[in-house]
Amino acid sequence: MNTIHQIMSKNCLRRSLRLIVLYSFCLVIQNFAMGVVHAESSSYDDFIFAVKFDDAATVKSLLQRGIDVNSVETLRGESALMVAIREKSLKVVDVLLSSPEIKLEARAQNGDTALMLASYSGNTVVVQKLITAGAEVNRPGWAAIHYAAASGNVETLNLLLDNAAYIDSESPNKTTPLMLAIWSGKYDTAKVLIDAGADIQLKNDAGMTAKDFAKEVGRNDLISLFK
């Protein structure tokens, strides 16, 4: 019996030791994982900060260390490229566009793309870089030409038209770039669109033409575009 008790005691001791070792190993793995998560979170924060402040060197360094070039800012759901465009971080824009993993068609929470943001801000240089990189000029629904028309930037609008932007592109409620230019009170872009052949007879879902928009805005200069 004593021998049996001794064997059982030894077996119990071995099992206890194995459990202790296993538990310690699990703690090491857990702490390591938490450390990795913390490091990744810290790197992400550093990355977004560097993007906002046009710190190209830091952005490049973090990309080389494995940070995702398409990281998304949680506040607006914008990609790093969109953040760089919004904050006018032009050196960072170049760094991000040089990455083969960059997703040019990523959408923010509101559906905006990088090209839409650049078109609205009237940053023709960035618009050209995005187009050269392969950004889609035309897409269903809201498109970059709507944003350029609404912003009033003639140079950006002409650049999009030169790159085959559909002049009568319709938003989900069938608002055309011309309607949007009129509604935004942008005489210059409205004139460019009319001179380029925009269809002034088109109606949106509310049955309004671009001329109706001009009357709604109450601007005689805009109404005169349709005479």
Image: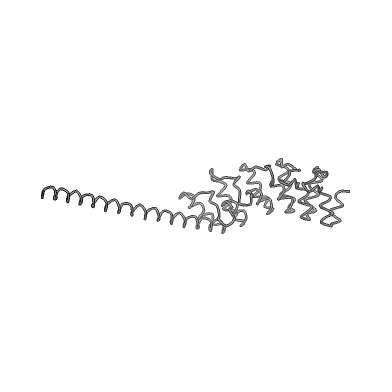
The number of numbered badges drawn on the structure is 0
Q: Position of residue 29 (x, y in %)?
A: 35, 52
Nearer-the-camera pick, 30 or 161: 30
Does residue 190 appear to the left or right of 90 in the view shown? right
Picture quadrant of residue 161: top right
Q: Where is residue 154 in the image (x, y as percent from the top left)?
A: 75, 50
Q: Where is residue 180 in the image (x, y as percent from the top left)?
A: 76, 51
Nearer-the-camera pick, 32 or 162: 32
Image: 174 above or below 121: above
Nearer-the-camera pick, 22 or 144: 22
Q: Where is residue 209 in the image (x, y as percent from the top left)?
A: 82, 47
The residue under the point 79% across, 50% down is 190
Q: Residue furthest left?
A: 2
Does residue 153 appear to the left or right of 84 in the view shown? right
Q: Residue furthest right?
A: 227
The residue under the point 50% across, 49% down is 68
Nearer-the-camera pick, 25 or 97: 25
Q: Residue furthest front?
A: 1
